[in-house]
């Protein structure tokens, strides 16, 4: 059993669409049962401005976004967690706009330089260790193409975070939420 470690849940639920409250509750309970201190951020309730693409977080204020809102705090919360869970509806094979906007703001977690990884150019780590990331994409319809795209997105993000990502798509009409989330936690922790 894992003890005294922090899990940060980034809930990308939107005002319209799939209700993630049941999945969130099952997830939080499952993490708590494993000894995690769980903090959930419902991103739709938090003001996070979009990334301006100015790269000041790399050049002017290394490691710190110049936009003074929760996005700046998010970077610190993420790097100080042992597990981050992206809980999101699957939108056209991607993350919800709420989650995507938050993730665009975490570029300060990497350095502005370049490094080859698996034959591709990526940014090197700013920190020695990074949290594990579990991605749970929730959908209410069968769409194989969307699932393939979502899984590819997780794989690409894993490269940028040095293979700390795992994830899956959960179809609420086909899969038992409890079994799927429990299985994902077992495979990740």
Image (cartoon, grey):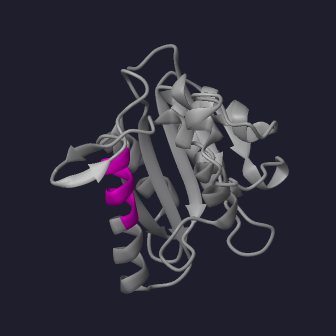
Frontmost residue, 83 versus 59:
59
x, y percent for residue 123: 37, 42
- Tell me if residue 37 comes above or below residue 136 in the rendering: above
Quadrant occupied by the N terminus = top left
Frontmost residue, 75 versus 171:
75
Residue located at (38% from left, 58% from top) = 154
Q: Is residue 12 visible?
A: no
- Report the residue that reaches farthest toward the front: 60
- Report the residue that reaches farthest toward the top: 4
Please, what is the dominant secondary structure of the magenta stretch? helix
Residue located at (15% from left, 54% from top) = 119
Does 154 lie within the magenta span? yes
x, y percent for residue 16: 78, 74
Frontmost residue, 84 versus 180:
84
Q: Is residue 28 left or right of residue 69?
A: left
Q: Is residue 37 left or right of residue 154?
A: right
Q: Which residues are magenta?
A: 153-160
x, y percent for residue 174: 45, 76
Location of residue 146 (image quadrant): bottom left
Residue located at (81% from left, 68% from top) = 15
Q: Is residue 62 visible?
A: yes
Residue located at (35% from left, 66% from top) = 151
């Amino acid at each position: 059993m894992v003890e005294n470690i922090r899990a940060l849940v980034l809930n990308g639920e939107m005002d319209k669409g799939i209700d993630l409250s049941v999945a969130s509750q099952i997830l939080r309970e499952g993490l708590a049962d494993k000894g995690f201190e769980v903090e959930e951020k419902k991103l739709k309730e938090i003001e996070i401005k979009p990334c301006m693409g100015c790269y000041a977080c790399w050049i002017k204020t290394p490691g710190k976004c110049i936009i003074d809102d929760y996005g700046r705090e998010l970077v610190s919360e993420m790097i100080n967690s042992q597990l981050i869970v992206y809980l999101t509806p699957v939108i056209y094979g991607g993350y919800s706009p709420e989650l995507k906007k938050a993730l665009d703001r975490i570029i300060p977690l990497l350095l502005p330089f370049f490094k080859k990884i698996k034959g591709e150019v990526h940014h090197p780590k700013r920190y020695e260790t990074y949290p594990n990331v579990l991605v749970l994409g929730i959908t209410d319809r069968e769409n194989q193409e969307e699932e393939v795209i979502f899984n590819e997105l997780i794989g690409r993000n894993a490269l940028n975070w040095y293979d700390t990502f795992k994830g899956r798509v959960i179809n609420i009409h086909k899969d038992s939420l409890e079994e799927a989330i429990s299985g994902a936690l077992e495979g990740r922790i």
